[in-house]
Amino acid sequence: MSSIAPDICADFLVEAGEILDQLGEQMVALERAPGDRECLNAVFRGFHTIKGGAGFLGATALVELCHAAEECLGAARNGSANLLPRHFDAAQQSLDWLQAMVDAVEQRSPVPEAPAELVAAFALDEAGAVRGHGHRPALGEAGEHVLVVSSGSCESDSVQAEVTVLDALTGSTRVLTPWVEGDWQQTVTSAAVAR
């Protein structure tokens, strides 16, 4: 970072400081109304902007933490994932780390790395997180986590579905062909639990 012009670094510090001041309130608002697209986009842009400036300065630890948050928020923006409570917790905790990192840039000190657990908390691939378009998590009896990974066709008021169910805990799959009236998701979940 020592080769970066002081005015560029100063611009980053001002912009990052303003964004971090806003992100705390925006995250609280988003947690209260996770469907608020405008708020989700604002939070995403905040992490994205800090990441871009940090990348230009070569502050890799800042980039990595912002990237983890940005990936999680980006998946929520495009509808391939839902934000879970742990994502909100991680985003709030990351604000303190980002501030410490920005302070290190200002002091021309080494930028501390965020804890691996914090970065990992943004992951979307654990049981219960929605992965991919059209996947819906379901919790069966005895705590079984299943993800419906394909569905069938509609015929008048009933649905015929051949469904492949992935047990997210064991990685095993099974195919079900239930005839279902009304809410096929609940029936498929019950059938999957019954095995």
Image (cartoon, grey):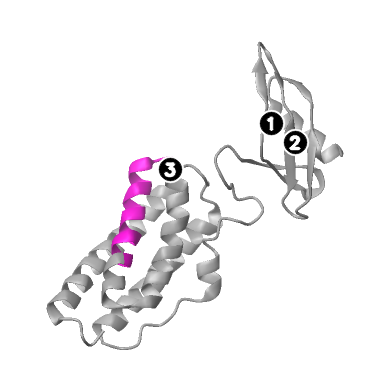
What range is drawn magenta here? Answer: 33-51
> Which residue shows up at 48% across the image and 42% down it?
79
Q: Looking at the rendering, in which quadrant would you find the C terminus? A: top right
Residue extending furthest left? 7
**Cα–Cα span, label 2 and label 3:** 28 Å
**Cα–Cα span, label 1 and label 2:** 6 Å
Q: Is residue 49 magenta?
A: yes
In terms of secondary structure, where does tag 3 sit? loop
Q: Quadrant of residue 180?
A: top right
> Which residue shows up at 82% across the image and 40% down it?
193
The numbered mark at residue 185 is 1
Residue type highlighted by circle 1:
Gln
The numbered mark at residue 38 is none
* Residue ID for mark 2: 189
Left or right: 153 in relation to 106: right
Q: Is residue 102 magenta?
A: no
The rendered magenta stretch, by its main secondary structure, is classed as helix
> Which residue shows up at 79% across the image and 28% down it?
177
Which of discs 1 and 3 lies nearer the camera? The answer is 1
Most foreground residue, 123 or 14: 123
The answer to whether one can see residue 65 in this image is yes
Q: What crowding class fits label 1: few (fewer than 14 Cα within 10 Å), some (14-19), or many (20 or more)? A: some
> Which residue shows up at 79% across the image and 50% down it?
172
Q: Is residue 73 above or below residue 161?
A: below
Residue type highlighted by circle 2:
Thr
**Cα–Cα span, label 1 and label 3:** 25 Å
Q: What crowding class fits label 3: few (fewer than 14 Cα within 10 Å), some (14-19), or many (20 or more)? A: few
Q: Are marks 1 and 2 in contact (CB under 8 Å)?
A: yes
The answer to whether one can see residue 96 in this image is no
* Residue ID for mark 3: 33
